[in-house]
Amino acid sequence: MSLRIASRRLRLPSQCSRSFARRGFPQSLKPLQEASEKNNAKTTHFGFETVPEAEKEARVGKVFSSVASSYDTMNDLMSLGIHRLWKDHFVRSLNPGSRAASQDQAWSILDIAGGTGDIAFRMLDHATNVNGDNLTKVTISDINPDMLEEGKKRSLQTPYANSGRIDFKVGNAEKLGFVADNSIDLYTVAFGIRNFTDKDAALREAFRVLKPGGVFACLEFSHVDSSLFNAFYKRWSFGAIPLIGQVVAGDRDSYQYLVESIERFPTQKEFKAMIQKAGFVTPGVGYENLTGGIAAIHKGIKPV
Amino acid sequence: MALRRCRIHKLSPTLTGKKCVSSTQSAVRTYYSIHHPDPAPFPPIQAQILSTALKNVPRLGFSRDALLSGCRENGYLEASAQLFPRGVYDLIHYYLVTQRLALKEKVQFQQDAKLGLTQKVKTLTWARLQANVDDGIIEHWQDALGHMSLLENIPASLKELGNLSDEIWYLSGDTQVDFGWYTKRAQLAAVYAATETFMSTDRSKDYADTKEFLDRRLGDVRVVGGTVGGAMSYMGWIAGNGLGLARSWGMKKDAEQQPNNLVGISLFGNQDEVEAMSRLKKKLSSMRNNRS
């Protein structure tokens, strides 16, 4: 299966430009080839492909621009609706919001790669309804303006649209210029970090912006423990998901990229070590597996 | 008091709820040694926050407020409560572990005092129960017991109870290496759990009722153990009679057969009874073979 995918990628551009033209990828690969010759020093992975680092950001951008409007539908189809349970559990276990009624106890939350606002709206709901905190604020940051537009549209359906508690900012997680040092209580990234070019840089940036005692929390696809369950899961991922993408959204390649990027993500223990390397203290085991390891929540606390 | 003898059969320290390692260490010691100090049971940041939180428990109870007060007073944020994935139970677990480890310092037996094993066990158990009172925890102990009995916390709570029972027996100088090791610890764990639950509702002066309760429970254990031991001795005597009867019927000494599992008898009987029972079993089975 992987050989077939690899051989597809190795086709010459001239032979496949017609088929690519119909998909969400760049119309011509020539400018990208020239660029890659200039920056051929550092490469990274884009799914199972190896691409120059400078190119990955643009290609990820194209993937998410093409899936933005049907993002939730696709998530529902891919995870059979379980992604909602994962996100609910993620927010509930973080328990954002303060029972104390004062402004200085209110949390300031930064949600990275949270364009469509799934996590941000859940955080605000939890803070307001469970903890009675009307002052906690969330800043949603995403590198892709189309996803942020989708998020702004959805925020109009929530009570927080013009309340001053939500803020949308375009930005790169590896370089958050608009966030001051030591200013965030809770930094979350849900299903975003596997798309980052340099995860270590993002972790270091998270360490910078968090207050001492602040929490880094990451919800991401991860590796399944049981090898039997893993066999079924991989069959579903590589067989069914690109097919669903092709049938429902007309975009097989984006979803092929998505499942390949899940495969290339570090294991739970490796990612925990990366979090510790950035300076965080990981509580307990350091991660929590969801649905047998299909997704995992990683947490780290910035020491005082 | 020779407390420094080799504890070859102590429960491994890694059986406590958390591994004895900080989040940055990777080595976990898998053996126990009295010649090398135990690694700290909790990582330093968590230990610092939980010890502060514990000081606030008499006022705030075993609640999230106590945990958050511990975070705040050490310069951490409310969000830092994420350090404790089990929430309030982490605070209770910390209390249980630190009180158990403090028993060694609290109770020092004099070398020359001629105290029996039972008396030492009673002193240590009472010292641990008294610690609940001294720290002002006892008013909130029913809440703690409630948290400990939640389904996800039961394994860790039972483990801590077993560890405490083991600690008390060890500090009183128990060196028995047969199956009684397990029964003694199980009995003491049951007695301790019952006494602590009783104590949480006791309103008598200086918890005198609890002390009497403890005496009665330990007495029960002694009586029941003695009764069962007596019953086994009686059965051994009957077996000896059966042996004599079999010999009078013309039973001869036969080839030895595989001894059956006699663990149950070795619980309460002594060596003679064990041997008598094993001989009787061999004779009876060889008699069966002769007759068939």
Image (cartoon, rainbow, N blue to C red):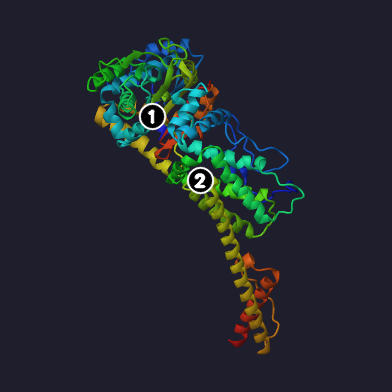
Residue at position x 69%, y 50% in the image: B8
Q: Amino acid at mark 2?
A: Ser
Q: Which residue is mark 1?
A: A95
Question: Judging from the image, what secondary structure is the residue with disc 1 in?
Answer: loop
Q: Nearer the viewer, residue A259 or A290?
A: A290
Q: Amino acid at mark 1?
A: Asn
Q: Position of residue A219 (x, y in %)?
A: 41, 29
Q: Which residue is mark 2?
A: B157
Residue farthest to the right, as pictured: B112
Which residue occupies 68% across, 75% down?
B276
Q: Is residue B70 above or below residue A226?
A: above
Choose between A51 and B222: the one closer to the eye. Answer: B222
Residue A105 is marked as: none
- Alpha-carbon distance for marks 1 and 2? 25 Å
Q: Is residue B93 left or right of residue B261?
A: left
Residue B161 is situated, as x and y percent measured from the top left of the image, at 55, 48
Q: Where residue A174 sits in the image (x, y, percent)?
A: 45, 15
